[in-house]
Amino acid sequence: MKRALLVGRVSIPDVILKFQNQFVLGIYRHSGKRLTLVLIFMLKKYYILTAVVLVLLLSISHTILSQEEDKVDRLAVVSTFTGKVSIRHNLMVRPVTAVGNRIRNSSLYKKDTVITKSASTADIMFDDNTTLQISEDSTILIGSKAVTGREKAERIFSRKIAIDQQSDVRIVKITVGSLRANITTSRTILTEFETPSGTASVRGTALDIGYLAGMTSISLFEGLLGFTSAGNEVGFDINPGNSVDIISPGTGTVAVSAREGDLEIDTDVGTAIVEEDEMFSIVVDKNKAETSIASERGSVVLVTDVGSISMDKGESVDVGVDPVTGNLTVAGTVGNVVITTDDGVTTAVEPGKIIGAAKETAKRKDAGAADSAEDDADKNLEGPHLLFIFDASRSMNDIMENNVSKLDAAKKALSDHIGTLPANLNVGLEVYGHKETADCGDIEIIVPIGRLDIDEMRQKIDSIQAYGDTSIAAALELAADAMRPLVGEKSIVLLSDGVETCGGDPIRSAARIRDEMGIDVGVHVAGLGVDSSEREQLAGISQAGGGTYHTADNSGQLEKTLTEIEKNEPLGEIYETNLLLKENGGHLMTAPQDEWKQTIDGMEVKAPVLAFSSAVYAFKYEQMATFNAFSVCIPGEADSNLMVFELLVSDRSWSGPFRSIGRFQALNSGTPEAPYQQIRFPDVTSRFLKVQLETNYGDSKRTVLYEFQLYGKLKDRSEY
C-alpha cells in the first residue's frame, strides 16, 4: 500500500489510531475557529520513519500546512522588519524570522502583540493596504471588535469621525513606543489607536502616534482624527498639520499641549481654545461635582454660554454644577481671571457667577446600550439594589471538582442563591461572553434591575453558554450606567474565573464607580477556580470598588460566598485608633515565632515568618473592641509578600472558638511612600483577632510580613 497525504478539516484532537494493519497519525493545528488535520497512512513498518519526518517538518517555525484557515482569521502580516521583532500570540512569544503571506510567524491574529527591541523596526500591512511602521522599543497590540451601542454613545466629543455609522473597529493599542500609520479610507472600518491617555479614532488618515513616559503624542498629516480621553474628561478633533501631546496621570486629570496648530477642546463646562505652543489642564472631581480648568502655558480661553473666560499661565477657574438647577457656577479662581460677555464687556470672574448650564450626558447617549440599561431599570424602586455580573467567557467551560465545569457550578450556585434573597431587594443580571460571536462587545443586561422574579431569573441563568472573551472593565462600566439613576444602597457582584482579556482596566473601572457613587455602592468579587495571577486582579477590583473578595472551588463554596456577600452591611466611617499598635495597648497573645511581635511595633521592618502559620492578638487590657478596617504594610513587590490570608475573631479566649470575618488578598505592589493596603468590613466586636496566613506570591516556605493595623475603638467595660 502506498503512503498518501491528505489535508482536511475536522474537529477532533491529536490522535494516533491503530486499526487493521495500518497506522493513522493525526496532527492538528488551531487557527481561529478551524482545525487542520494531516493524516498519514502507512504500512506499520514505515510509521517510525514517517513520524520523524513529520516532526522535523513541523519544527520549521514558519511552515504552514494549510493557508486557507489563516487568511480567514488573520488581521495583518509583518511585511518587513529589521533586528529583533517578535509576536505574542496568547501566552506564546515567537520571533519573526521571515516575512510573506505564507509565513506563519509573520501573521497577526486578533489580540496578537508586536514587540520590537532596541534598534529594531517592523512594518505591518492589513488586508485593505493600511500600514503601520513600528519604531524600536515598542509594544503594539492588534485587534478588532464590533462596536456596541454604549461604546458608540461614549464617543461624545468626536464630531467628525461619525462612529455611529461604523459597525467594525480595528484596534491598535500602544502600550509603549511609537508608530507611523497610513490608514486606507474605508466606510465600514474605523481604526482606533488606544493609549492609557485615551482613544484616537481615525479614518483615511496618515499620522504619527506614540506613548512614552506617560505622554501620548500625535502628529496628523492628512485625513480626520478625533481624540477622547480615557475618562471622557475632554474630546477634540485634530486637523492635518496639528501636533498635540496629551498627559493623563489618572482618572479625572488631563493636560493637552498644542505643539503645532490650534485646538478646540470640548469639556463639560465649555470649549477650551488652545493655540499653538499653549497648554491647558482639566481636573474633574466627580465627588464634589467640580471641574477645574487651568492654563499651564500661554493664554487659554474657555468659551461658555455667557462669554469667554481668559486665563494666563498659572491661572485657573473652578466650576461647580448645581445638583438641582444644573447651572454651572464659579466656585473659585486663581489669578486675574476675567470673562468677556457677548456684548464686549470684560469683568473679573467672581465666585458664585453663573456661566451656563451643564451639558446633559443623557442627551449625548441616545444610541447606546447604557441608555437601554437605564430605561430598563425601574427608577422609582427604592433600594437596596443588587446586580450580578456573570462571566461567560470560554474558560468557564474548564472542568473543576467532580467533573463539573465552572459554568455549570456558577449557574447552579447562582440559581440556588437567588431563592434565598430578601423580598425587598431589587435584582438584575448582566452577562458577558455569552454570544456565539465571541466578541469583546458581547455584554448584555439580560434581567433588568427590578423586583425579583425567581422563575424568570433561573430560566435566564440556565440559558447562559460560555463562548467569548473576558471583558470585565466594559461590563463594570455598563453596570455603573444601570446603577447610576437608582436611589439607595447599591451592590455589584462579579462572578468570574479570570483576568481581563479585552484590553480594559477593570481596577480603574471599579475605582471610577466608587468615585462616582460614593460609599453607597460596593463592587464585590467571587473568584471561581482562579490561580494566583487571576486572584490578584480580581482582588484588586474588589479593593478599588470598596467591596470584598472571595474565592470558591465548587458550586457549594460559591453559594456560601454569595450568601456572605449578600449579608454585608453598608460600611461606616473608619475608626481612628490602631488597636494593634503596641503603644496603644495591643499585644501578641500567641504565635509560633517571636518575629510576629514586629508586626505591631510600628517600625515597618521585615518579619519573616513561617508560611501557613497564624498569630492571635489582643487589645488593651484584653478588652472588647469594635473595628472595621485592617491594613497590611507591603512596601514593594516581592515573591515572599503575603497574598491570601484570613481574619478571625473570638469573644471568649485567645484559643477560640473563632469565627471568620473573611478571606482577603493583598496585592503584590506598594511603595515605601504608600505601603499600606486597607481592607474594610462592617463593624465587628470581639476581644481577640487571629491572622491566618495562607499563601504568598512565590513558593517560599516563609512569608515576609511588615506591619498590621486594625482600626477601631475599645468598648467600655460597662457595655458588656
Image: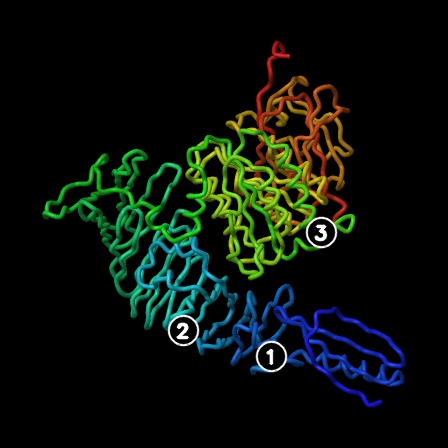
User: Sequence-wise, which precedes: disc 2 or disc 1?
Assistant: 1
Circle 3 is placed at which residue position? 405
**Which quadrant of the figure has residue 51?**
bottom right
Q: Which mark is residue 157?
A: none
What residue appears at the point 18 percent right and 45 percent down from the top-left corner? 306
Q: Amino acid at mark 3?
A: Ser
In the image, residue 160 sits, relative to residue 356, either above or below, namely: below
Residue 406 in the image: x percent, y percent? 69, 50
Which amino acid is tagged 2?
Ile
- Taking the spot 63% from the left edge, 42% from the top edge, the residue there is 526
**Which residue is situated farthest in the top direction here?**
718
Q: Residues within 10 Å of mark 3 (few under 14, many from 20)?
A: some
Q: Disc 2 marks which residue?
A: 183
Mark 3 or mark 2, whichever is nearer to me? 3
Front one among 663 and 27: 27
Instruction: Find residue 705 and report its horizontal and vertical position in percent.
Output: 67, 39
Q: Position of residue 286 (x, y in %)?
A: 39, 40
Percent position of residue 460, x then y: 59, 46
Give the mark toward the camera: 2 or 1. 1
> For numbered disc 1, what is the local secondary structure?
helix
Please give the residue where the numbered disc 1 appears in the rendered image.
Answer: 68
Asked if marks 3 and 2 touch (Cβ < 8 Å), the reply is no
Could you tell me how far apart the alpha carbons at marks 3 and 2 are, in whole angstroms? 44 Å
Label 3 to label 1: alpha-carbon separation? 33 Å
Quadrant that contains the C terminus? top right
